[in-house]
Image: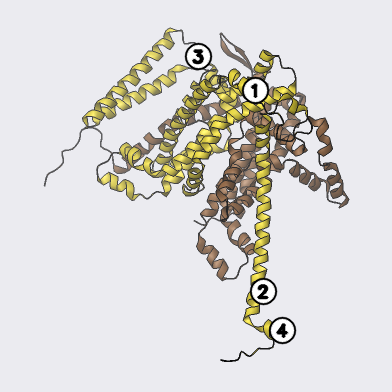
Chain colours: A yellow, B brown
Amino acid sequence: MQKVEKKKFSWQEFKASPQYFDKKSRTLNGTKNFFLALFRLIIIVGISYIILAPVIEIIARSFFSEADSVNPMVFTIPISPTLERYEKVLQYMDYLPILGNTLLYVAGVTLAQLLICSMVGYGFARYRFPLKGVFFAFVVVMIVVPMSTIQFPLYVAFRYFNVLPYAGIAAAFGIFLLVMGIRTRNSISKWVTIAAGAAVVAAAAIFAKQYIDGGSVPINLHRTVWPTFIMTIFGCGLRSGLYIYIFNQFFRGLPKEIEEAALVDGAGTFYTYFRIMMPNATPAVITVAVFSIVWQYNDSFFASNFTIPDSVLITQKLAGLVDRIANAEKIYSLREQRLYFNAGVVLVLVPIVLIYVILQRRFIEGVERSGIVG
Amino acid sequence: MTVRPKKKGISLSYEQRNAVRGYSFILPWLIGFAMFYIVSLGQLVQFSFWEITMDPNTGMTHNSVGFANYITAFTSHASFKQTLTSSIMDMLIDLPMIVFFSLFVALILNRKFKGRALVRAIFFLPIILSADAVGDAINRAAELVSAGVSSSELETAQAGTVSISYYIQLFGDLALPDNILEYIVGAVNRIASIIRGFGVQTILFIAALQSIPSSLYEVARIEGATGYETLWKVTIPMTMPHIITNTIYTLVDRFTNSEIVALASRTYRQYYDYGLSSAFSVISTLITCAILGLIVYLLNKRAFYYN
């Protein structure tokens, strides 16, 4: 057996050795990383608190009984929780039918946004045409000039709504469909297109005739959902400019070879767009869909400017909820009225939070990959 | 070899056909833009020189009053000037706070750490919590939370409130200039509203950070740059174009939610003073666009475009 010779430890020697340097930098790095992680944790927890605290507060207070609301000892967790708020709110808010209407309205607008904005974005991304730069500057104008600037002209436009120009546009679109239908060779889609075109032209003619027969009195479209749909179909819906921009950026990032292959295989322009480009644009579609659903649901600009009725939009219903309950139930204490309002807020937020939770992972991935910023 | 028979109808060159296709894609939007934006902007300017009366039967009647609406706005209207100044000040205070804060948060969220998915979900929650009716409730709840006591009205809450005036005095003793002090106090006061207004900007910045080529970071590391230097020499210059995008977004967003827009809306919805409301819109939009143009011009001079 070999005897292990114990070496005398020399501080000087150790300091000069590479192990010392390694150890030193490792401890330094470790400390640095620890403090960075701590710093990050503090920031994250702090911001999360600021964001979540009011939400938790609202949820908690929607379960408060009257005794809890006046008891200064109660902090967030009620002593005698009650479901009375929810019962009353569900009853007076007409919750499920109106939520159904709201979701239909939001889904309809979102589908229109997706169709129109993706088309416009695709047109800008893939085709060259005269004045393209000017028109794209218009898209930027839509993003930069807020819609609230033109709130009053829009109010007037739909308060005294003139049907004729729109009937003209619809008729022109119908004729376009007819021509397209006559030119296509495929038998089924040919007749479908021709039928659709004829129907659109006929409908436009009937509307225009009724309007003129009625003495051309402008129609009041307020208190209906028509203003939102008309503006969205013409690409000027809520934040449409932003959506057009997102789609444009995304389509510009897709390789051109896809379309060239489609073209060689004999696909037409619109076939290529609907069947080949749109399925490839799923990340952008999800991004825009989430934005559109959430913002349309939360929207107050269209809702208040065109007085969209509270039977269609649940956030509008929420605004009048407290007064309705207070009057019907003879509740005069403002404090108790607020408790009902909290329950209403929770009920309004639940569906949109669910949609967000379901879609959020794909949404954030979509934002990262769709090149939203170019 | 077979020669394809020539089709009937107009024959277009490839480029012309492409142009027609492009136009057919953007046509619905083009019509809408002309009808809703160009016409509306024109009308807005026109309305601001009119005195308008609305009649349910006959529609709108008007007579031209020249610059009277503008003169009223600036000389005799009770609250226009104050609202305008405070709205613009709010915008200018919030703007740098939101942009830098969202960049900072994006830098944090862009790193890999445990529970990142959850943190992201929480941070983007404010995007969906900003409805008018809902936002009102959230603001109210936030006041109660920041007051420290949840269940009671403000009288009982005051005992738990942090005394802001003490800190103001503390900073005042440090002989900080008054306007800087005001800015800091204002920023601290509105921290909650700032955090709740930065979701979209953070998303944009995360996307921007992801698009920075990693080779730049490798070079920086090999050259021996510290993390701090990398931040200033690589990350910030590379995100500069997106800082501009975010500045535009933030400014427009703040303007849309500002008190001056609400005033213009009230003026025609409650007081039926349509001409004056249009004048308000024209003035505030012009000022906002001027600020926007100036800021973008200044930032653009410093911006660096990679591509």
User: Which of B245 and B97 lies nearest the eye of the viewer?
Assistant: B97
Q: Residue at x 57, y 46 (%)?
A: B118
Near mark 3 (Cα within 10 A), the count class, few <14, some 14-19 or many ≥20, is some
> Which of the marked residues, 1 or 4, is nearer the chain's N terminus?
4
- Mark 1 and mark 4, same subunit? yes
Task: Please name the amino acid that badge 4 sits on.
Answer: Trp
| Letter of the chain that mark 2 sits on in the rendering | A
The local secondary structure at tag 3 comes to loop
> Which of the marked residues, 3 or 1, is nearer the chain's N terminus?
1
Residue B136 lies in what quarter of the image? top right
Residue B139 lies in what quarter of the image? top right
Q: CA distance from mark 2 to mark 3?
A: 81 Å
Name the residue tied to disc 4.
A11
Give the residue furthest to the right. Answer: B173
Name the residue tied to disc 1.
A84
| Letter of the chain that mark 3 sits on in the rendering | A
| Contact, mark 3 vs mark 4 (Cβ under 8 Å) | no
Task: Please name the amino acid that badge 1 sits on.
Answer: Glu
Name the residue tied to disc 2.
A24
Q: CA distance from mark 2 to mark 4?
A: 14 Å
